[in-house]
Image (cartoon, rainbow, N blue to C red):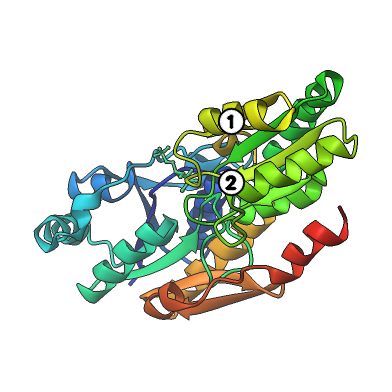
Amino acid sequence: MAKRVGVLTSGGDDPGMNAAIRAVVRAGLRNGCEMYVIFEGYKGLVENNIYKVDRSAVSEIISRGGTVLKSARLPEFKDINVRKKAIANLRKNKIDALVCIGGDGTYMGAMRLTEMGINCIGVPGTIDNDIASTDYTIGFDTCLNTIVECTDKIRDTTESHQRCSIVEVMGRRCGDLALFAGIAEGVDMIITPDHPISDEDIIENLKEWKKAGKKHVMMIVSENIYANIAAFAAQITKETGYECRAEVLGRIQRGGSPSAQDRVLAARLGAHAIDLIMEGKGGLCVGLINNKVVHYDINEALQLPRDKHMNLLRLIDLLK
Ligand code: F6P
């Protein structure tokens, strides 16, 4: 009997989610599955926002940012009674398996649903690159390129006005976006959760640079490090001689057409998710390690230590 497979996107959206949805739907149909989409992530499962689709439903979405299935965060999904409603709706639609595209919160939901009898496969879709079971998450590359494009522009005006700019980027608790963007930009300082620098040390460095005649300074910091980054910029202006501006890039980082790299990653991982479902597997998540498509048990994946990219951290000082 043909399998009936659903796909949803959950958590923060990212460029490449649509390419992943397309890959899952098309690969599923090719394997003889009936394919269903769930709108608004786990919320849509609970509210039975579920529709059968054919291949044309995912036409022309490969290059679009965001997620055509919409996304939602549903903290209540931790509650077993809420999940029971989701399971009841899946049973009502006779859906046997689910592909859940998102970050670690999405993986947690996928694991719980698998424990309750629906085979789920997690696909890493988040700009944050904070999932240890893959070298890169879908969306990270596009986001990085957006940050670099914006920071290039900020650099132009920073240089003209001989200022100091602090660019704050997303990443939740993960510093990869700041680290990779900082290296791509050749900035003077990168501050991330894995590479913290005290306010005192930053101020001291800036004073020394000013004394040595350095005209302008570019810094990249991860979000959630400064409670009030504008206040810190004001402190720098007051204490170092550099006129400092803070730039919080915000949600511009999550939008836009996915890069070729993110589209290819989405195609590879979406197709692998369907391979696993065809083998009757669940409770797994797919990823790319050393350019090979792999999968892990979700429980294991969530415990894996993240690569802190110490080899890249070294470049900050080396290339200054
Ligand atoms: O997880 C993706 C992400 O963009 C994080 O980098 C950021 O901390 C968070 O989502 C912001 O979420 P929201 O748009 O719901 O405020």
How many numbered callouts?
2
Residues 26 and 109: in front is 109
Quadrant containing the N terminus in the rendered view: bottom left
Residue located 28% across and 72% down the image: 114
Q: Mark 2: which amino acid?
A: Asp
Percent across and percent down for residue 273 are 49, 68
Within-10-Å neighbours for mark 2: few <14, some 14–19, many 20+: few
Query: What secondary structure is marked by label 2?
Result: helix
Q: Are marks 1 and 2 in contact (CB under 8 Å)?
A: yes
Residue 263 visible, this angle? no
Q: Is residue 174 above or below residue 220?
A: below
Q: Quadrant of ligand 1?
A: top left
Residue beneath disc 2: 199
Is 211 situated left or right of 181 in this image? right
Query: What secondary structure is marked by label 1?
Result: helix
Name the quadrant containing residue 60: top right
Q: CA distance from mark 1 to mark 2?
A: 10 Å
Q: Is residue 318 above or below residue 202?
A: below
Residue beneath disc 1: 235
